[in-house]
Image (spheres, coloured by chain):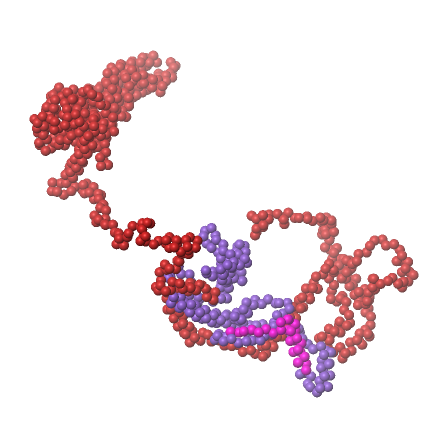
Chain colours: A red, B purple
Amino acid sequence: MTWKDIPPVPTSQEFIDIVLSRTQRRLPTQIRAGFKISRIRAFYTRKVKFTQETCSDKFSMIVSSFPILTDQHPFHRDLMNILYDADHFKVALGQVSTARHLIETISRDYVRLLKYSQSLFQCKQLKRAALGRMATLIKRLKDPLLYLDQVRQHLARLPDINPTTRTLLVAGFPNVGKSSFVRSVTRADTPVEPYAFTTKSLFVGHLDYKYLRYQVIDTPGILDHPLEEMNTIEMQSVTALAHLRAAICFFIDISEQCGYSLKAQCNLFKSIKPLFANKMVFIVLNKMDIKAFEDLEPEMQAELNDLTKTGEVELLRASCATQDGVQDVKNRVCERLLVERVAQKLKAGTGSNGAMGSRLTEVMSRIHVAQPLDGIVRQTFIPEGVKNLKKYDKADPERRQLARDEEEANGGAGVFNVDLRRDYILDNPSWKYDRIPEVIDGQNVYDFIDPDIEAKLQALEEEEEKLEKEGFYESEEEEEDESEAEVLEKAEYIREKHRLIRNEAKMRKSLKNRAMIPRKAHKKSFAQLEDHLDQLGVDTEEINLRGRAREQPHTRGRPLPDRYAGREEEDPDAMDIDTRTPHQRVERSKSRARSVPATDRMNDGLTTMEDKTKIEKVRKLGQRKLNRMARQGEADRHIPASMPKHLFSGKRTMGKTNSR
Amino acid sequence: MRIDSCFFCGRPAWPSKGITFMRNDGKSFRFCRSKCHKNFKMKRNPRKLKWTKAHRRNAGKEMVVDSTLQFAARRNVPVRYNRELVAKTVKAIERISEVRARRERVFYKKRMAGKRAREVASARKLVANNEHLLPRLRGSEKRRLAELAAEQGVSIEELEAEGLANMRSSKKTLAFGGEKQRLRVRTDGGVETITERAEVSLLGEDDDDNDDDEMDTD
């Protein structure tokens, strides 16, 4: 429970300033004398109302931010009562609340009056009066507001005490070492000084025990006098003792250095005993380093023992100065507190008939404590051979022989070869040095090694037998037929022939830039004709081919050129014998205008004049369209690109031209 | 030591031959020769190259399903050496390869069944269509034979037939090598010797099944 976030409470003057400046800021006066009176009235009404609303909001915020005493834990309620006086606190909050109502009344009254005002001036005066009265009211709240702000500041600094958690409460006379104990067992930095009432309020520290957090409350010292005479500081201790369900550590200074006799301390214990009802109480004998329990007078020892006689109170010993027994005290107290709290919870959860309540059952079902190995103890196992093994000693001549010794005996490193085969584990030790076949007939022997090879081979043999029986291996030999052989032979001859024909055609096909000459125009000698006919099986002598050829008359029409007609051409390399007519000689002696090409491309391949004219016609026809549209023709000069870009750039499909 | 099969062509790759490529994911590729290695580097698909085992298996040219092929396998279970077991295995290997060879022969025969009939049929067709290309006796030769026949008193037809046969067959002897001896293994295991005229033509026509020859001569 914390009250650290209560907003600050302004003083009355600050309050007035806040309210009025807010009003001025939010509703600036924008009104002129010429405005309609209704508008002026409305504006001032709004202003008054706004001021009232701001005040009310602020007041209600103050009231709601403070804790309501009746809702608090009895401990906190009592503590606040002691520290701030509950009546005073309630009255202050009441005054603030009343002021809010009064301000509401004032605003209501003045809003009513404003309805009847006749002028701007009247309105303004009424507003002034209203705000003035509100301010007066707030001014009167000066004291309560101041008080509330102080309470707020004190509340924020109050230690965060949780009344329900595991708590250790340290109590005792002033100066007996309560704070030193808290200091030594927790992380709290409680002030320790050698005078009474160093601790003037409650302090809280925390300690861990068995992974649980415990709250340790350091209380101011208590003097042994009636409750009515106790001051505020002592009353805090008493409140804590009365309301917190904690383990109480009553500290007693047996050295009496605190200035109070042992007797007085015992008496205090007895007088505040009613506060210990239903609580665990420990008496901690502090400052054992100065005076041991045994050094006390017997009657004092008896007195102390008397206190613990009831059995509920336990006597512990410690010395905060030397830290002797401090941890023991802590552990003891924490342990008992834990056991007690668990027992109490179990008891609370269990009904009167012994059945566990539903909530407790649920908690218990979630708890599982694991036991390692179900509590079985396993012994370490050391084999007999290892247990009896003699410890290896290099100096001992009877020592165990190591592989290293063997190496040394057989020539040392580099000479000695470790026999790996010796340690083979085989069914028969005599197999150790067998040469194991690796490859047979191009097959890996190891691929065939199989423990049940025999069975598999047997299965194969059976299958083989079965196949044999089924006639799987029988084959009908194809008898060679005489006529078939002849046909095949003939076919082979024909194929050969085909190949030759094809070859010849291929060779003929390469024109080498010469014109294609029709077969009809080819020169064929008579001998060739004769031979061909002979080949075809015609008896040329019988049909008297040569005789008929000589009788053949000349063909009619224009004679063919020499080289087509089968007549011998003139040898161009022959010596120029003058066989020409005088006319020819004159023609020849004339100078030639231009060189004549070796081949006549215009007329090559043409046999008749008709062909020539026909070609001319076709050519002209093809040219006609191009001529008409002034298109580029094949006769036009054309320079093709030497390296067309599209054929030489870009990456190739299968790599290169520096890949992709 | 172990004989691996070539990753590319499937031939046995003997130790010290070929090359092994270890890919950086740990897979190893054994190649029997640089040809296979180069083809692999060119990212060629072995199934599409006729000279690989992968292609032949894929095209049904080789026996793939058979119990004899089940014996050799890499079993990743180490077996301790046992003299009797190894002896048995060695014997078994011999027997298994014998049986396998026999079955392969049958497989081949079955695959080739009807081939000759098809050949003859196509030859008949060819001959029928190209009668004019068959050799004929020259006119002058006919006259000579007729004169010879008249002289010797034999029938002209006989002489002509002889002459024709000579013409046809004389072509064949053009190739060098003359005769060729082939060993044919019968399915029952016997071996017979066949003497054949060399059929190596001068132009070397490609037959689509010239791999069949190697099967006959093992």
- Residue A152 pos. (x, y %): 25, 22
Q: Position of residue A499 (x, y in %)?
A: 65, 68
Q: Is residue A52 left or right of residue A552?
A: left
Q: Position of residue A146 (x, y in %)?
A: 25, 17
Q: Is residue B119 magenta?
A: no
Residue B112, horizontal then vertical, whole percent:
52, 71
Observer able to see residue A147: yes
Within the image, what quadrant is residue A605 found in?
bottom right
Decide which of A357, B67 is in the foreground and name it. B67
A388 or A158: nearer the eye?
A388
Q: Residue at x 37, y 66 (%)?
A: A452
- Residue at the image point whose x is 55% and y is 69% from the top: B213
Q: Up-down: is A607 above or below A395?
A: below
Q: Is residue A222 visible?
A: no
Left-right relation of A131 to A644: left
- Classify B35 as above or below A463: above
Q: Locate the N terminus of chain A and report the quarter of the image it occupies.
A: top left
| Span highlighted in magenta in the image | B159-185
Q: Residue furthest right?
A: A582
**Is residue B161 found inside the magenta-colored segment of the image?**
yes
Q: Residue at x 24, y 22 (%)?
A: A154
Depth check: give the residue in front, A77 or B184.
Answer: B184
Q: Using the image, determine if residue B153 lies above or below residue A131.
A: below
Task: Judge by depth and name the residue closer to the eye, A51 or A508.
Answer: A508
Q: Quadrant of residue A76?
A: top left
Q: Is residue A587 left or right of residue B75?
A: right
